[in-house]
Image: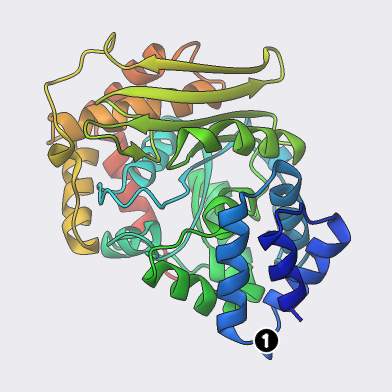
């Protein structure tokens, strides 16, 4: 039963790998009470998940997932995922989803892993669906999209059937304002096994542990970020409004942490309100304006900064500034919107 593991984490004890395996089997068991699952997730979050625990949960859940009939070796370069973990509760528009499309239009192979909204008004699946892009592709269709378009959205419930019995507990935690382990796990469970990742987390303290976990799981290049905003909050994205906590590693550069501001970039004056989004339909309109090159305001700056970092992580830009400039060219040329239109032709 989960109660013994609830007690263990309440006592502050780190779970061993065999214990994590047992917990995963219990979380995936439909017979276990939802309240017990939610209590375990809340208590684990209150203790604070260690790098070893997060990696163990990711590896166990990967073992229960459906594999994509595709291999990263089929890509010309790195396979990129861009994902915020959620949990910042700042209701910004879908920045990472926009960035993923921009990077694919720039020639990077992008496998975007995501779900519907849990802690926000519009998740990545919601806004892509509102744009007319199919989000629930079967594994063979998903692999075909990667080969033909260098972009695919991988809908987490399609590839992680065990989540069916975990989702109610996570939803219960979300209703209570409680983040869970699964906010971290999403970027770690991509069935395409990306080799490069830009991941946003909602607190600077999570930056290094998440990066260490990605490194432990075999990702080749990664940057984990948490961006501050006026008033003391943090975005699970790079912020144009304040300092950014960053942990990164690359095969040729090793592991490093830093804090830096986006002030050297050509930013327009902006407030957090300028980055706010709405529901999936509202955000689809915002994304369409950005991807068509019609929106030249602060939202574009947020996209360019994060796309610049993503293109650097993917190894196709020598710096974030060079990536910014390349992303700006993609938007100005209409390439990003043409990609959306090509993806719209596919249906599950």
**Position in image of residue 265 (x %, y %):** 27, 13
Q: Secondary structure at mark 1?
A: loop
Q: Which residue is at the front of the view, 25 or 109?
A: 25
Which quadrant holds residue 7? bottom right
> Within 10 Å of the Cα at label 1, are there few (<14), some (14-19), or many (20+) other Cα atoms?
some
Coloration of the structure image: rainbow
Q: Which residue is at the front of the view, 76 or 245?
A: 245
Q: Which residue of the protein is positioned furthest toward the front in this rendering? A: 11
Q: Is residue 334 left or right of residue 184?
A: left
Whether 240 is drawn above or below 157: the answer is above
**Position in image of residue 211 (x %, y %):** 62, 33
Quarter of the image with the N terminus is bottom right
Whether 221 is drawn above or below 184: the answer is above
Report the residue at 71% width, 66% height from top: 65
Which quadrant holds residue 40? bottom right
Report the residue at 69% width, 50% height from top: 54
Q: Which residue is at the front of the view, 10 or 214?
A: 10
**Position in image of residue 294 (x %, y %):** 12, 36
Residue, disc 1: 32
Q: Is residue 78 visible?
A: yes
Q: Is residue 96 left or right of residue 67?
A: left
Which quadrant holds residue 102? top left
**Position in image of residue 313 (x %, y %):** 54, 25
């Amino acid at each position: 039963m989960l109660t013994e593991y609830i007690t263990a984490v309440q006592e502050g004890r780190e779970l061993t790998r065999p214990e994590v395996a047992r917990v995963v089997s219990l979380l995936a068991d439909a017979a276990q009470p939802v309240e017990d699952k939610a209590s375990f997730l809340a208590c684990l979050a209150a203790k604070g998940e260690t790098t070893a625990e997060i990696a163990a949960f990711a590896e166990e859940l990967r073992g229960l997932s459906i594999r994509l009939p595709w291999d990263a070796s089929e890509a010309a370069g790195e396979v990129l995922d861009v994902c915020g973990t959620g949990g910042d509760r700042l209701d910004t528009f879908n920045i990472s989803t926009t960035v993923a499309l921009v990077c694919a239009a720039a020639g990077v192979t992008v496998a975007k892993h995501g779900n519907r909204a849990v802690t926000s008004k519009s998740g990545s699946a919601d806004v892509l669906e509102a744009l007319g892009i199919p989000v629930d592709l079967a594994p063979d269709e998903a692999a075909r999209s990667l080969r033909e378009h260098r972009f695919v959205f991988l809908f987490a419930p399609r590839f992680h059937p065990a989540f069916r019995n975990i989702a109610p507990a996570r939803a219960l935690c979300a209703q209570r304002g409680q983040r869970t382990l699964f906010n971290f796990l999403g970027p770690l469970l991509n069935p395409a096994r990306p080799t490069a990742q830009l991941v946003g987390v909602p607190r600077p303290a999570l930056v290094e542990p998440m990066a260490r976990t990605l490194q432990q799981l075999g990702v080749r290049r990664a940057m984990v970020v948490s961006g501050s905003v006026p008033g003391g909050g943090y975005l699970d994205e790079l912020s144009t409004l304040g300092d950014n906590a960053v942990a990164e590693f690359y095969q040729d550069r090793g592991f490093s942490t830093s804090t830096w501001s986006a002030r050297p970039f050509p930013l327009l004056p902006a407030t957090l309100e300028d980055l706010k989004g709405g529901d999936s339909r509202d955000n689809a309109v915002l994304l369409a304006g950005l991807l068509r090159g019609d929106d030249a305001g602060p939202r574009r700056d947020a996209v360019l900064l994060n796309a610049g970092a993503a293109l650097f992580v993917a190894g196709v830009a020598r710096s974030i500034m060079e990536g910014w400039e390349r992303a700006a060219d993609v938007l100005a040329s209409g390439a990003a919107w043409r990609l959306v239109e090509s993806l719209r032709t596919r249906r599950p």
